Image (cartoon, helix red, strand yellow):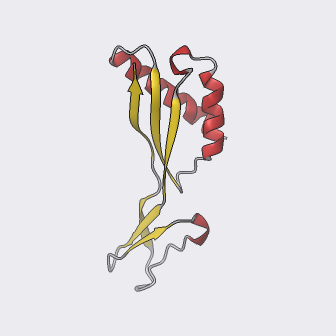
């Protein structure tokens, strides 16, 4: 379970942002997490909430998650496929029968932070 380490890394980045911008606290943070990033969102939220109890500057932080579906492109014909569900993830172009390259869905990044 690496979500605890990810949550700790997010907190460290938030701490740096707070310090660099002279903020007292972080009120919200938005993460973009891809469907095939390997992150269990519920476990990440649980770990973040546990850390929240120990860190004054994030006690009231609202953590928002933007979930990114998988998008893949055929390297031969250029057709783009979007998958709403990783259960139906077939990484072969229906036109060319060639492997697809993932262009979205691996994200794990902080995209917005607000503080006071």
| Residue 19 position by quadrant | top left
Quadrant in which the N terminus appears: top right
Q: Position of residue 49 (x, y in %)?
A: 63, 29
Residue at 34% over, 18% down: 20
Q: Is 23 above or below relative to 112?
A: above
Front one among 4 and 85: 85
Q: Position of residue 97 (x, y in %)?
A: 45, 84
Front one among 43 and 26: 26
Q: Position of residue 90 (x, y in %)?
A: 54, 74
Q: Is 101 above or below relative to 94?
A: above
Q: Position of residue 115 (x, y in %)?
A: 40, 23
Look at the image and tell me whether residue 33 can be seen: yes
Residue at 62% over, 17% down: 54
Residue at 38% over, 23% down: 17
Q: Is residue 2 left or right of residue 33?
A: right
Quadrant in which the C terminus appears: top left
Look at the image and tell me whether residue 2 can be seen: no
Residue at 55% over, 70% down: 89
Q: Is residue 51 left or right of residue 94?
A: right
Q: How many marks?
A: 0
Q: Is 73 above or below relative to 47?
A: below
């Amino acid at each position: 379970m690496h979500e605890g380490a990810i949550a700790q890394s997010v907190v460290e980045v938030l701490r740096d942002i707070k310090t660099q911008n002279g903020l007292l606290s972080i009120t919200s943070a938005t993460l973009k997490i891809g469907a095939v990033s390997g992150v269990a969102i519920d476990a990440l939220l649980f770990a973040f909430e546990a850390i929240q109890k120990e860190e004054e500057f994030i006690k009231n932080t609202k953590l928002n998650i933007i979930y990114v579906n998988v998008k893949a492109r055929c390297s031969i014909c250029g057709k783009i496929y979007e998958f709403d569900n990783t259960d139906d993830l077939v990484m072969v172009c229906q036109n060319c029968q060639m492997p697809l390259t993932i262009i979205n869905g691996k994200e794990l990044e902080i995209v917005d932070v607000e503080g006071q």
